[in-house]
Image (spheres, grey):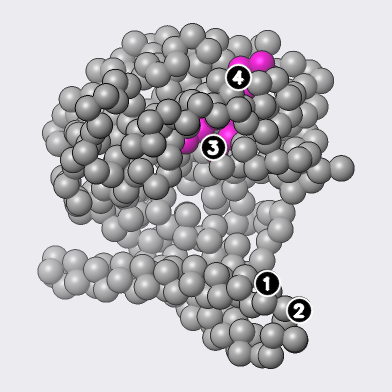
């Protein structure tokens, strides 16, 4: 039977604050811990100039005078149970249903029955999350935990799409601290990356400390390039192997996630090929969904089905527009460099 959506005991705090704390029950072991959560509507994207798709979240609006935590949006958005080690995105953790989560039974075996959190690398990472609360080292440990949990199953049954997602999130965390390091309040709409990030040194000590985990995790991604490489391989294997709940739209969304990683690797030939494939497939699928949406509501099993179709069409339109704009930018850059 599927687990019920996760129960929380929230301490909402000031409504104007971008974060709040809540005591949240782990969906796997059912232990409750107080966590720091981000209000998604209090963030906005900050575009990195010169990159087609790279961006980092910053806080929207001005910093409240009584907001004392030195937290950046990418420090948050993940929740970890330090009792069993399960780590996921804030949204997935709170709405987790075992029957619809890929590899849930396998993760229960490793985290609950085998107690993986009592062994390296999860042991050290969970201790860092538990002890650090809001310091940069605990935030890095949180992101590494999210990747490490997905790497627990044997390679042949891993959820490669989830590995790609968590590794890409880790790469963005590194982008924010190691490459950008600028203001996350009252930030402009776009920025150029500085020669040196003023926040890079905040991860020096944690990275040195977690280097000691290479005995249990030889390829631990302790830098932007390593995280991006893991994300690229994860998404690539997911696309080649297939994944649970695969539909034409979900396949397109996976390709779009791969696209963002490829754009950061600067492989322009591969990027152009992916863009053209996404554009062709999105237009074909859009046409099919529009025809389906034009059928009588009685043929679509009611208004709920129609709303789902309209949501899918909107997502496809967004991918089509962004892909088309990116192709135009690539063509313009090629003419300019000729």
Name the residue: 31% across, 67% down.
326
Disc 1 from disc 3: Cα separation = 26 Å
Q: Residues within 10 Å of mark 4 (few under 14, many from 20)?
A: some
Magenta residues? 77-90
Judging by the rendered image, the residue that carries numbered circle 2 is 301
Give the residue furthest to the front.
Answer: 14
Identified at 77% across, 22% down, the residue is 112
Q: Is residue 80 magenta?
A: yes
- Which corner quadrant holds the N terminus? top right
Whole-Å distance between the Cαs marked 4 and 2?
42 Å
Above or below for 65 versus 52: above
| Residue 297 or residue 194, whichever sits in front | 297
Q: Which residue is mark 3?
A: 90
SS type, badge 4: strand
Sequence-first tag of 4 and 2: 4
Q: Position of residue 158 (x, y in %)?
A: 69, 40
Which type of secondary structure does the marked residue at label 3 adopt?
A: helix
């Amino acid at each position: 039977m599927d687990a019920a959506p996760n129960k929380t005991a929230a301490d909402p705090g000031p409504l104007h604050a971008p974060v709040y704390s809540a005591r949240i029950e782990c969906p796997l072991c059912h232990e409750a811990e107080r966590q720091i959560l981000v209000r998604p509507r209090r963030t906005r994207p900050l575009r990195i100039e010169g990159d087609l798709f790279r961006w980092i979240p910053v806080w929207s609006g001005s910093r409240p005078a009584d907001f004392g935590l030195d937290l950046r949006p990418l420090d948050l958005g993940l929740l970890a149970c330090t009792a069993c080690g399960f780590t996921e995105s804030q949204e997935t953790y709170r709405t987790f249903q075992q029957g619809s989560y890929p590899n849930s039974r396998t993760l229960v075996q490793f985290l609950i029955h085998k107690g993986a959190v009592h062994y390296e690398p999860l042991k050290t990472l969970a201790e860092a999350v538990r002890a650090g609360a809001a310091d940069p080292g605990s935030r890095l440990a949180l992101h590494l935990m999210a990747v490490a949990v997905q790497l627990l199953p044997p390679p042949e049954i891993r959820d490669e799409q989830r590995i790609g997602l968590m590794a890409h999130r880790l790469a963005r965390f590194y982008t924010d601290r190691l490459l950008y390091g600028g203001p996350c309040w009252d930030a402009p709409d776009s920025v150029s990356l500085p020669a040196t990030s003023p926040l890079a040194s905040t991860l020096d000590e944690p990275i040195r400390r977690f280097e000691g985990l290479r005995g249990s995790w030889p390829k631990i991604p302790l830098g932007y390039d390593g995280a991006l490489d893991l994300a690229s391989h994860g998404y690539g294997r997911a696309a080649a192997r297939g994944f649970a709940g695969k539909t034409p739209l979900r396949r397109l969304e996976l390709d779009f996630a791969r696209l963002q990683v490829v754009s950061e690797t600067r492989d322009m030939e591969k990027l152009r090929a992916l863009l053209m494939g996404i554009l062709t497939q999105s237009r074909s699928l859009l046409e099919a969904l529009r025809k389906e949406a034009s059928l009588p509501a009685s043929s679509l099993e009611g208004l709920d089905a129609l709303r789902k179709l309209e949501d899918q069409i909107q997502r496809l339109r967004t991918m089509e527009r962004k892909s088309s704009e990116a192709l135009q930018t690539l063509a313009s850059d090629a003419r300019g460099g000729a």
